[in-house]
Amino acid sequence: MKTGGRLRGFTLIELLVVVLIIGILASVGVPQYFKVVEKGRVAEAVAYTGTLRRAQERYCLYRGSYAGDANVMDTGVPKFKYFDNAATVTGGAAAAGWTVVFTRKAGAPTAYGAYTVTFNSLTGNFSSNSANAINDLLPK
């Protein structure tokens, strides 16, 4: 554009600097974005674990042992959006506690790959078969 005899606009160097800055910001921001999104998806399993914990306590109160199958409790198993619907619950008459294992749906596009989330009632802690998932996604 010409105004008053002078050309005004951006030089190629200025445009390259802007593109470089945007690229650097994107390289930092995109992985953080995917981490936050995946953490939100793990919240589905964590929330159900709270429901399952209360149902297990009720079951144990009435029957004297923990349930070895989520389908026999009063809550049932919901349809999960991000995890396989067969949440594996182990426990039973001989067990002092119970565990539940959630498996991330196969083929899900995730930077963490295929992973599981396990809750152990004896320790009250979540664990995973993926070190990255333990560090980034699970509640402390």
Image (tube, rainbow, N blue to C red):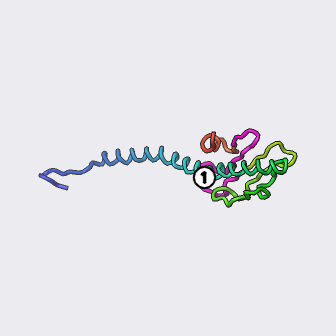
* Magenta residue check for 125: yes
Amino acid of disc 1:
Arg
Q: Position of residue 57 (x, y in %)?
A: 76, 47
User: Which sits in the foreground, 21 or 87?
Assistant: 87
Q: How many marks?
A: 1
Closest to the observer, 51 or 26: 51
Question: How far across and how far down the image is residue 17, in percent?
Answer: 35, 44
Front residue of 38 and 73? 73
- Which residue lies most toward the front here? 62
Residue 123: image quadrant is: top right
Residue 50's spot in the image, x, y percent?
68, 48
Q: Quadrant of residue 131?
A: top right
Q: Name the quarter where the N terminus is drawn.
A: bottom left
Residue at the limit of the structure toward the bottom, as seen here: 79
Which residue is at 84% across, 47% downward? 65
Circle 1 crowding by C-alpha within 10 Å: few under 14, some 14–19, many from 20: some
User: In the displayed structure, does residue 28 sit left or right of residue 125?
Assistant: left
Image quadrant in which the C terminus is located: top right
- Magenta-drawn segment: 102-126
Q: Among all residues in the image, which is located at the extreme left?
A: 4
Residue found at x 35% / y 46%: 18
Percent position of residue 110, x then y? 60, 52
Q: Residue at x 77, y 50 (%)?
A: 58
Residue 89 horizontal side relative to residue 39, left or right: right
Q: Tag 1, which secondary structure?
A: helix
Q: Is 121 situated left or right of 10 in this image?
A: right
Compare residues 105 and 10 and report the one nearer the observer.
Answer: 105
Residue, disc 1: 41
Secondary structure mostly seen in the magenta stretch? loop
Asked if residue 84 lies in the magenta stretch, the reply is no
